Amino acid sequence: MRMKSLIAAACMAVAGVGAASAEGKVKVGMITTLSGGGAGLGIDVRDGFLLAAKMAGNDDLEIVVEDDQRKPDIAVQLADKMIQSEKVDVLTGIIWSNLAMAVVPAATAQGKFYLSPNAGPSALAGKGCHANYYNVAWQNDNLHEAAGGYANSAGFENSFILAPNYPAGQDALTGYKRIYDGALAGEVFTKLGQKDYASEIAQIRASDADSIFFFLPGGMGISFLKQYADSGLDIPVVGPAFSFDQGILQAVGDAALGVKNTSQWNKDIDNPANKAFVEAFQAEYGRLPSLYASQGFDTANLLLSAMDKADIGDAEAFRAALREADFDSTRGDFEFAANNHPVQDIYVREVIKEGDVYTNKIIGVALEDHSNVYVDECEM
């Protein structure tokens, strides 16, 4: 489908985002997951991005949205079409790291900008970094590193860890182990898209684990948490926000209450941009925003801030404008490290219930002004 950002010029503007210069329009190709498993993640990224564009009311921004169906070959076909036929200037939207690895290097090699609202594989942060690639969410390891730090502070000494066997899952366990000081009761890679975790839960039961760390985004996390709750096991669980985010919690229900998870964003971060975003998102879509929605929103506002300073036809000037990150992030303080990945605080959240709605509240800071370990490998 095709959507433009001039939907409602009467909407209030986000602080820090002005009108783009009249020197030229910017066409964005958004490839994201809108059907099948994980569709909720892509829908939230899309909705957050489109909301920021709508609030800015910028006639110089055009957005084309397509569904990758969570399939790398489809994502590559769509990227080729957008670059060659649609003549987009910027690509964005991909949720899954295996799809990002299939699309991003080819797109940047053709001179296109890629702004990632989610996937941040280590291969694109280190030796595979590129001056046209900016990750506005995090480097994949980050939230898992924070979970490892929380596990240390909670006194966990023997964690059982599991994640899907794809780039983000591999980065997840690497990140957790990088910070976590204890032993491992078990380490398992599951199938991407897996829904039955009876075997893994049996392994956890047979282990000597005093804690469980898992990264299972989307429907995978819903399935695991429900099956874990039904198993009768009572081992503390910790994980990244991806398995305890707004869209997932309503499906999981009471099984998630009290679980600690790590995130660079939550709806209760106290700054004007975040308050305006949460209020506007609820008014526009009738639901609370998720982590993914906040990332889509920030990605659009980063792009708009660069459009305010430079013509995209001047690639070097536009790169410099993106690197400045001169926008009011929903996260508060935000800047890019030398490899174009965020430096930001990462919080510990706890799953709670507000009325009939399951959500999260921030209970502390896990990592402050945190960057990523791949910066020194990046040569730009």
Image (tube, rainbow, N blue to C red):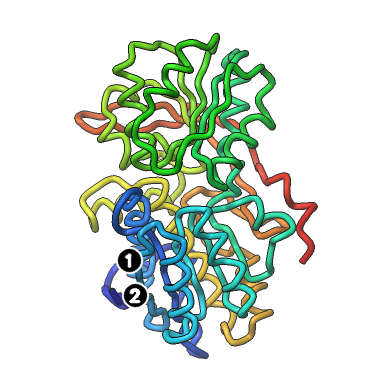
The type of residue carrying mark 2 is: Ser
The residue carrying mark 1 is 12
Q: Give the quadrant of residue 320.
A: bottom right
Q: Position of residue 52 (x, y in %)?
A: 38, 64
Residue 220 position in % (x across, y down): 37, 37
Instruction: Decide if residue 367 is in sight here.
Output: no
* 137 is higher (above) or lower (below) than 145: below
Disc 1 to disc 2, C-alpha distance:
13 Å
Name the residue nearer the viewer: 261 or 352. Answer: 261
Label 1 or label 2, whichever lies nearer to me, is 2
Residue at far front of view: 199
Q: Is the residue 66 above or below the residue 331 in the image?
A: below
Secondary-structure class at tag 1? loop
- Dot 2: few (<14), some (14–19), or many (≥20) neighbours within 10 Å? many
**Of 326 and 2, the residue lying toward us:** 2
Q: Tell whether 232 sits left or right of 110.
A: left
The quarter of the picture where the N terminus appears is bottom left
First along the sequence among labels 1 and 2: 2
Q: Where, quadrant-wise, is the C terminus in this rendering?
A: bottom right
- Specify few, some or many for label 1: CA neighbours under 10 Å numbering under 14, 14-19, or 20 or more: few
Q: Nearer the viewer, residue 271 or 23?
A: 23
Foreground: 277 or 141? 141
Which residue is labeled 2 in the image? 5
Task: State whether residue 45 is above or below residue 190.
Answer: below
Q: Secondary structure at mark 2?
A: loop
